[in-house]
Amino acid sequence: MRRLIQLIIGSLVILLFFSACSRPEPPADDSILRKPLDELTVEDMERMGAVVETNYGAFRFRFFPREAPNTVKNFIKLVRVGFYDGLHIHRVAPGLYLQGGDPKGDSTGGPGWTIPLERNSHSNRRGAVGMWHAPLYVNDAGSQFYVMIAHHPKMDKTYTVFGEVWQGMDTVDRIAHLPLDSTRGQPGAPLSPVLMTRVRLEPLPNSARP
């Protein structure tokens, strides 16, 4: 009888353990998505991320607001007004990165203002998200961003790394392997256009926070 009770208790403990492990994460608080830009704290920005939806799939990335607060706020501002919706991933540097966010589509466009470089310790490793600027003008970033396909440390401290893909690198790789058309004036333009149908913000699950 005692052994039977021990078996029942043991089974209940195991059942409770696996129930706790399989319990879904509670929904993240989305109130921060409606908070005024000038009231967002570093902690708020660490609790949100971006979703880039394209005609080839979607990818998600988290922000690094402690190291690049102005860059993150600038990106959030642009997303909130729908700046990126309908723009293209207009360039692929083979084996290096994807580039998008240019309303002109030729790597020369922007939102009408620029932001300064925020050097930090984050490396341009695979999945890193950074702000693009003209190579000779480090304080000339605006809306164009890139996603690293592979690690390229020579770009470190030359561009602002302000985030990192945490889900959807398969989409990034799919776009990175599209055939390129270099006859349209923009070297590295995908032969089949890659449209960012929507870029939006979302609260991050705890497991995805930096």
Image: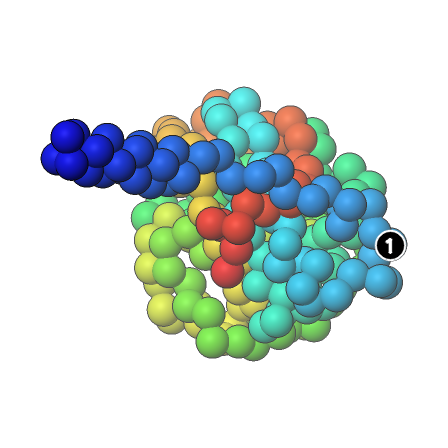
On the question of residue 81 being in view, the answer is yes
Would you place residue 32 above or below residue 137 in this image? above
Q: Secondary structure at mark 1?
A: loop
Give percent across and percent down for residue 74.
74, 58
Count the labels in the image. Answer: 1
Quadrant where the N terminus is found in the figure: top left
- Residue flagged by tag 1: what amino acid is it? Pro
Q: Is 151 displayed left or right of 38 in the figure?
A: left
Q: Nearer the viewer, residue 123 or 9?
A: 9
On the question of residue 176 being in view, the answer is no
For image coordinates 68% across by 58% down, the residue present is: 45
Q: How is the image coloured?
A: rainbow
Q: Which residue is mark 1?
A: 36
For image coordinates 78% across by 45% down, the residue present is: 31
Q: Is 12 displayed left or right of 186 in the figure?
A: left
For image coordinates 61% across by 38% down, the residue present is: 27
Q: Nearer the viewer, residue 100 or 106?
A: 100
Give percent across and percent down for residue 64.
57, 63
Would you place residue 12 above or below residue 138 in this image? above
Give percent across and percent down for residue 135.
55, 67
Give percent across and percent down for residue 3.
12, 35
Q: Is 18 displayed left or right of 102 in the figure?
A: left
Q: Nearer the viewer, residue 57 or 19?
A: 19
Question: Mark 1 Cα within 10 Å, few/some/many (few <14, many 20+)?
Answer: few
Q: Is 42 displayed left or right of 129 in the figure?
A: right
For image coordinates 63% across by 65% down, the residue present is: 65
Would you place residue 190 above or below residue 97 in this image? above
Residue furthest out toward the front: 1
